[in-house]
Image (cartoon, helix red, strand yellow):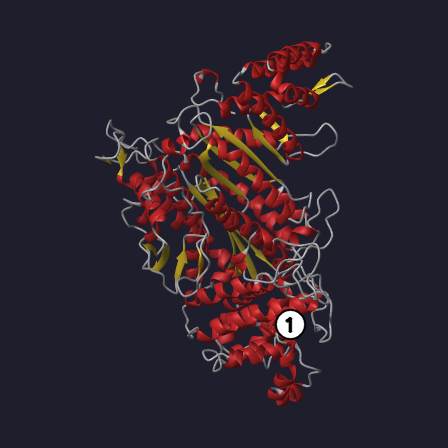
Amino acid sequence: MFKLSDVYIAALLHDIGKFYQRACPERKDEILRRQKQLVELLGLHGLPHQVWGCDFVESLESMKSRVNVIQGVLHHHNIDERFPVGFLVSIADRVSASERLDYNTQEKEDAVETRQLESILSHVSLVSQPMSKWYKSIGRLSEIDRQEFPKKEPLDYQKETIMYRNLWNEFYELLQKEQIKESDNLEEYDRFYYILKEYTSNIPSAFYYSHPDISLFSHLSSTAAVAAALYREFENEIKDGNFGFLKELAKDLEAQNRDRKVLGIVKGDLSGIQDFIYNIPTEHALKKLKGRSFYLDFLIYIIGRWILRREGLPIANLIMSGGGHFYLIVPAKTIDRLEEYQRFVDNVIYRAHGTELAVIITGMKLSLTEMTEFSETLKKLGELSEEWKNKKFSTIINTQAFFEPIRVTADSCPYCYRETRHNDETEEPECEFCESFAELGKQLAKSKYLVLEFVNERPDIEIKRVDDVFRAFGYRLVFTNEGSPKAYALQKSDKLDFKKCMTFVSPATYMCKDEEGNLMELDKMANVSIGVKRWGVLRGDVDNLGSIFREGLGTKVSLSRVSALSEEFKLFFGYYLEKLVSREFKECSVIYSGGDDFLIIGPWSSLPRLAKVLREDFRKFVCENENVTVSMAIAISRDVKFPVFRIAEAAGENLDRAKEYKRASDERKKNAIGFMEEIIGWEEWDEFEAIKELLEKLVEKTKKRVILNYMYEASNLYEDSIDKKTYFKSWRLVYKIARFKNAHKDVSELAENLLDKILMKDGNKLYPHLYGCARWVEFSTRKESLFDDMIRVC
């Protein structure tokens, strides 16, 4: 009899032969000789990828005795009860890759078409046609850099084959050394899962018959998730040796039957994120911000893993996690247990946070056919989750503890109302629980690795510290500077080394440090700024993300495609962004960056350049596809000790305005940045920056700031003329600029260039963002602001 671990590993490896086949075509005759008897016995033509996969699995020291795994890989195209593992994987394969019309066909052995992965982002279409094909570089996932972004032209066949071979050889050598022990504890296979992710995320799952925009890893992992869920759903039948259900499932797929619910999808939603993150004192704010942000991101991940652990499912079934959400693929019968899980979660979260935070868990039972229409399924699940947000803590609302009064005294913690203790670092009262977030932030900054230890669940543990929340769910976080095979690397600027870790931790961890290696706090960060000594906040997120997932890839989008799209956004915002900041903007700190959004704190003068670089890199990463854009906003503190939450809120409000920005020339919205009280379309940024630089040179060369007053006055006059529908008296600006030129003849040409750029003589119009340009120069050319009351949160 076979176990779930057999099905899981077989599903993860079922198409690995395609990788082998593309990387080592010269080994075809060698493998054919070795597998000749098998090929003849099965009546196969040529050397299909499943035989390549079988040969690979047999060659691994730790896998050669796993007969059921080998059977699953070899027979994953056979609908035959004699090979139940292969049969089960074949059904999962079809559900995962439902967009493929060529399920029973093989890639032609002599195919010379490109074997590179097309970026799925180049195929997203909302209002305009997507761009032409863009090709991803063949290499390891974590080695992403600007030079590795998708290219318009594919590699030539010879170079492509060399890159495939190099990637394969490294992958094979690593796996040959791995001790992949047979275990009923599926968490033991996490490292194997992450190795596959590293080496198969930048190659296509199919390239000849299918549109090659789904990575091999997205297909392997989603197939493994469906296969594991089906195993658990029919576990009793499998143990009894009754495999008749497999034929029934195959018939359901052929007939597109929607009545038999055999799978489920679960969504976890974290509510109250913004208020919780910024509910901190000003002292040591960055440590506490970092700690709280990481805690939330890891909490939602831990809860997803906890449900999987309860259900006996592997990490592959956590198909998405980040941005306050998780999605799980589960057996249909799991949905019947969601109320039990919700009660457990409500109990822990309420005792830790009261009603400040909540985690809403919702789910739906699905037929195999409904699972193949995955984008529509996500839409329905989102609507269900929104309904349940109005029923927070409904599982415990009738308990006595929920209605117990909160005792608040003069010594109570002002952030969570617990009893406080003396804090040597600050005069503000703060309890042990709230202080532990600062300690978490400190650990993240000084440690290189994180190990997640599995311990017994303790739902009734007294929650005194952050660690106790994780322990309630059966997990313990261990920070260390010593690597290990099961560790998560915290520093994404380093190369992923499998000798020291198994993957990078998903939440952002980069924080700016001073010369002594301590976290740079806001006052020191502000002091790095050019001009006024202020810190600022940069926020951003992807425009129309919901529409991109629901509509951007067409109708009836498969699980594999949704997974591939999600992984692309996660790669940029969860990995590349942090790598970029840690290398080129070291003076900034990444507070959070996940599935599609981010918040960065840094010296205010660094943020405009960072925003521009991020936008340019994102545009290249999404293949210059106008359907996939990002909006941002910058807000600047009024003074060094100004509350972080106020500036974060201001940035959020400006981000909302940026997402409403509409061009005068067409119907496009969004794709803009809010900065210095202006909303500027990204296509306008270069002009905005050029005018700012002209103004800045005039101020620096003349040592006079009167030119800025001319800009402010002209902007106000122009706005007034628009409001009152009167003639704009542009001659006033021309006259003042002429006087300025006469007084400063050495900058006469600069002043004339400025006038040409800001005054449109044909329509008697003024450059619309002139006020923002002047404000930017006002900030950048002052050593210290003497007019704090004039500095608005912009």
Q: Which quadrant of the view contains residue 638?
A: top left
Residue 717, horizontal then vertical, whole percent: 65, 12
Q: Is 438 drawn above or below residue 479 in the view shown? A: above
Q: Is residue 84 visible?
A: no
Image spot of residue 709 (x, y percent): 57, 14
> Residue at coordinates 58% horizontally, 51% vertically from top-left?
146
Q: Nearer the viewer, residue 392 or 204?
A: 204
Question: Residue visible at 55% across and 53% down?
Answer: 145
Residue 690 falls left or right of residue 422: right
Q: Is residue 62 left or right of residue 18?
A: left
Q: Which residue is mark 1?
A: 22
- Most foreground residue, 325 or 394: 325
Q: Is residue 352 left or right of residue 78?
A: left
Viewer-side residue, 49 vs 750 = 750
State how many labels appear: 1
User: Identity of the amino acid at label 1?
Assistant: Arg
